[in-house]
Image: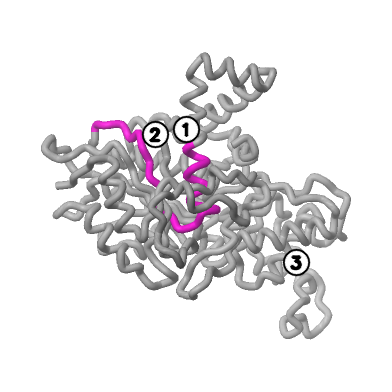
């Protein structure tokens, strides 16, 4: 977790939403507004579902998905446990994704149950008043404004204002000499939502922005450091669609950007924040929504266990295990003996103070978690799809692997070991209910 502190540098001006939390309000369309019945079982756990490779493959639903969700709702269509969908997709609004899931699963899903890779950007308020360049596909300007950015410039807007900068595709080059149309505000930060359609255009213009400090009328300043703040969502190297093999994801685009920048400057790209799975911040945001749904449904038991169901070792499993490690360390820091041991190991109280500072930053926006564990469940319908029979003992199945995680994440074999391996999401739900001794009515 120490290597992930960059996630929180952008959070030091977060506002306090204590009143909103006390009211239990997440949104006016929350789907967990039923009346408590003492005869109904009270869940003390919540479920975090990945989407691609778990519930769908491209546009095709995975057959086990509907079966799984029939077990998660009662006869009135109300969820019997709190559920959040945590996806690294970033090409649409939360409501759009909720509508898609409602259609696929046949149960009502609200936007307050959906976390896109870009959703936690709403907490990076110190950038909301800056002019940001956004890269990705879909309604990027609408997405940016929806998470709080007020002044937004797209790659297409840059290209129109500076037509001589995009030169790879000969058919798109200007036919006549053209002067820049410098009518855009100066870019002050760059936000990468997801993989774009024209990689060569996006890579060129993002590099131009970083090397000119946002002033495209000037020449590259390859020795200028630091570059403009860079925030990236979705680090998936690959993802699973309808094809037999995984497809390139935004993580692959980031690999290209990082290597081009380093080849030109000799320096590493520095990120102000990396969000989306496997970042702890994304899981903390998901835990907050789980807590809020339990409160809305008037379930009295605290949510102490989370189960994260995914198909990708490097994002879903790594992220769930990383958040579980954070939860365990947070509990340990309350133990005076554990704190003394940490001080003895490090030789100072700096590490302890740093962790407490992160907790304070999170509390100002989300409140501290009630969960004490986050357990990972790997399904075999997506990126991870073994040709052999599903092993009964997950501890012996993945000992060494090529690390497909992001450059700024440390490879730790323990973080890519799933707590459980099952065939599909329906088996995952059965397993979790059995683990929790939960029998819905």
- Residue position for label 3: 204
Please rate how many residues cluster around mark 1, counting C-alpha atoms within 10 Å: few if below 14, some from 14 to 19, many from 20.
some
As helix, strand or loop, the secondary structure at mark 1 comes to helix
Q: Are marks 2 and 1 in contact (CB under 8 Å)?
A: yes
- For the residue pair 145 and 304, the one nearer the viewer reads as 304
The reply to whether the magenta stretch includes residue 313 is: yes
Q: Is residue 199 above or below residue 88?
A: below
The N terminus - image quarter: top right
For residue 148, say whether it is visible.
no
| Mark nearer the viewer, 3 or 2 | 2
Give the Cα separation between the discs numbered 3 and 1. 41 Å
The percent coordinates of residue 392 (x first, y second) are 38, 52
The x, y position of residue 351, in whole percent, is 64, 25
Mark 2 or mark 1, earlier in chain = 1
What residue is rendered at 26% in x and 46% in y? 433
**Label number found at residue 371:** 2
In the picture, residue 167 is in which quadrant? Answer: bottom right
Position of residue 228 measured from the top left corner of the image (x, y, whole percent):
74, 49
Name the secondary structure under disc 2. loop
SS under mark 3: helix
* Residue on which the image places disc 1: 327
Q: Which residues are magenta?
A: 300-324
Count neighbours of disc 2 (C-alpha within 10 A) and say few if under 14, some if 14 to 19, many if 20 or more.
many
Depth check: 114 or 336 in front?
Answer: 336
Q: Locate residue 397, reporting x and y percent.
A: 49, 53
Residue 289 painted magenta? no
Q: Is residue 132 visible?
A: yes
Corner quadrant of residue 292: top left
């Amino acid at each position: 977790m120490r290597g992930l502190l960059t996630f929180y540098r952008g959070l030091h001006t977060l506002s306090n939403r204590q009143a909103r939390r006390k009211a239990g309000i997440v949104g006016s369309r929350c789907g967990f507004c039923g009346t408590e019945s003492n005869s109904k079982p009270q869940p003390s756990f919540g479920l975090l579902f990945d989407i691609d490779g778990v519930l769908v493959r491209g546009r095709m639903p995975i057959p086990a998905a509907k079966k799984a969700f029939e077990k998660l709702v009662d006869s009135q269509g109300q969820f019997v446990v709190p559920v959040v969908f945590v996806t690294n997709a970033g090409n649409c609004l939360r409501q759009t994704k909720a509508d898609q899931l409602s259609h696929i699963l046949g149960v009502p899903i609200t936007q307050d149950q959906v976390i896109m890779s870009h959703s936690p950007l709403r907490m990076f308020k110190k950038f909301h008043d800056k002019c940001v360049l956004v890269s990705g596909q879909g309604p990027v300007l609408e997405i940016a404004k929806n998470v709080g950015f007020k002044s937004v410039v797209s790659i297409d807007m840059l290209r129109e204002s500076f037509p001589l900068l995009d030169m790879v595709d000969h058919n798109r080059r200007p036919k006549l000499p053209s002067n820049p149309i410098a009518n855009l505000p100066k870019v002050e930060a760059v936000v990468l939502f997801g993989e774009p359609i024209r990689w060569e255009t996006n890579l060129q213009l993002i590099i131009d922005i970083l090397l000119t400090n946002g002033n495209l009328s000037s020449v590259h300043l390859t020795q200028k450091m630091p570059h403009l703040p860079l925030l990236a969502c979705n680090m998936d190297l690959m993802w699973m669609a309808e094809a037999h093999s995984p497809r390139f994801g935004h993580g692959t685009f980031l690999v290209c950007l990082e290597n081009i920048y380093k080849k030109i400057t000799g320096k590493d790209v520095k990120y102000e924040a990396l969000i989306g799975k496997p970042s702890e911040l994304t899981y903390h945001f998901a835990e907050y929504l789980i807590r809020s749904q339990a409160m809305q449904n008037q379930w009295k038991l605290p949510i102490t266990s989370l189960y994260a169901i995914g198909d990708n070792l490097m994002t879903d499993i790594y992220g769930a295990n990383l958040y579980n490690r954070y939860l365990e360390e947070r509990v340990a820091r309350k133990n005076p003996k554990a704190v003394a041991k940490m001080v003895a190991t490090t030789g100072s109280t700096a590490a302890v103070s740093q962790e407490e500072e992160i907790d304070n930053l999170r509390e100002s926006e989300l409140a501290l978690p009630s969960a004490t564990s986050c357990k990972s469940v790997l399904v075999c319908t997506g990126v991870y799809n073994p040709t052999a029979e599903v092993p009964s003992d997950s501890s012996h199945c993945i000992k060494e692997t090529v690390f497909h995680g992001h450059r700024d994440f440390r490879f730790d074999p323990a973080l890519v070991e799933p707590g459980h391996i099952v065939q599909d999401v329906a088996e995952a739900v059965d397993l979790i209910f059995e683990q929790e001794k939960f029998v819905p009515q």
